């Protein structure tokens, strides 16, 4: 199966993770469209770099890539928004609290996360 076919076959998986992670980590710095875009970028990365010889189902590998991409986007956006002063007061505290549990190691302890 080509990367394009894998991507097209798993678009719903990307939308699922974008919705789930955006809803769970609602913070002012990343909206749903941004989460969806990051999910599709993670899916495309997974489709291009998937190795069938490792014995891991593509959906599991793609899910890990998608989650990694969204978590990194949330972390990056929140950090830059807090530093630039766009997020202040209660929203700043909420953003910082939302970032604390976003440790990739604790969220995906049993999954191998590919590096770009």
Image (tube, rainbow, N blue to C red):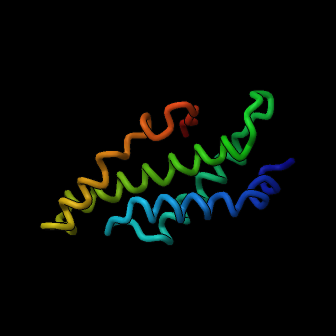
The residue located at (25%, 53%) in the rendering is 97
Most foreground residue, 109 or 75:
109
Which residue is the extreme one toward the top? Answer: 54
Residue 41 percent location from the top left of the image: 59, 56
Taking the spot 54% from the left edge, 36% from the top edge, the residue there is 115
Seen from this angle, which residue lies furthest right?
Answer: 1
User: Quick check: 60 left or right of 81?
Assistant: right
Q: Position of residue 73 (x, y in %)?
A: 42, 55
Instruction: Pinpoint residue 54: horizontal percent, then vertical percent.
Output: 75, 27
Judge left or right: residue 8 versus residue 101.
right
Could you say where residue 36 lies in the image, as x and y percent from the top left? 55, 65
Observer-nearest residue: 56 or 33? 56
Q: Residue at x 27, y 57 (%)?
A: 80
Residue 53 lies, with reference to residue 95, above or below; the image says: above
How many labels were placed on the picture?
Answer: 0
Furthest residue in direction left, as rendered: 89
Residue 25, quarter of the rendered image = bottom left
Residue name at image x 79 percent, y 34 percent: 52
Q: Quadrant of the C terminus?
A: top right
Vertically, is 67 above or below 15?
Answer: above
7 relative to 94 in the view: left or right: right
For the residue pair 84 and 61, the one nearer the viewer reads as 61
């Amino acid at each position: 199966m080509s990367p394009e076919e894998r991507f097209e076959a798993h678009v719903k998986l990307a939308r699922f993770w974008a919705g789930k992670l955006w809803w769970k980590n609602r913070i002012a710095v990343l909206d749903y469209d941004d989460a969806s875009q990051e999910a599709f970028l993670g899916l495309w990365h997974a489709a291009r770099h998937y190795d069938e010889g490792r014995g891991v189902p593509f959906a599991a590998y793609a899910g890990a890539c998608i989650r990694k991409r969204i978590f990194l986007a949330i972390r990056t956006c929140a950090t830059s928004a807090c530093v630039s002063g766009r997020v202040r007061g209660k929203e700043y505290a909420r953003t910082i609290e939302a970032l604390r549990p976003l440790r990739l190691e604790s969220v995906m302890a049993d999954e191998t996360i590919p590096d770009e």
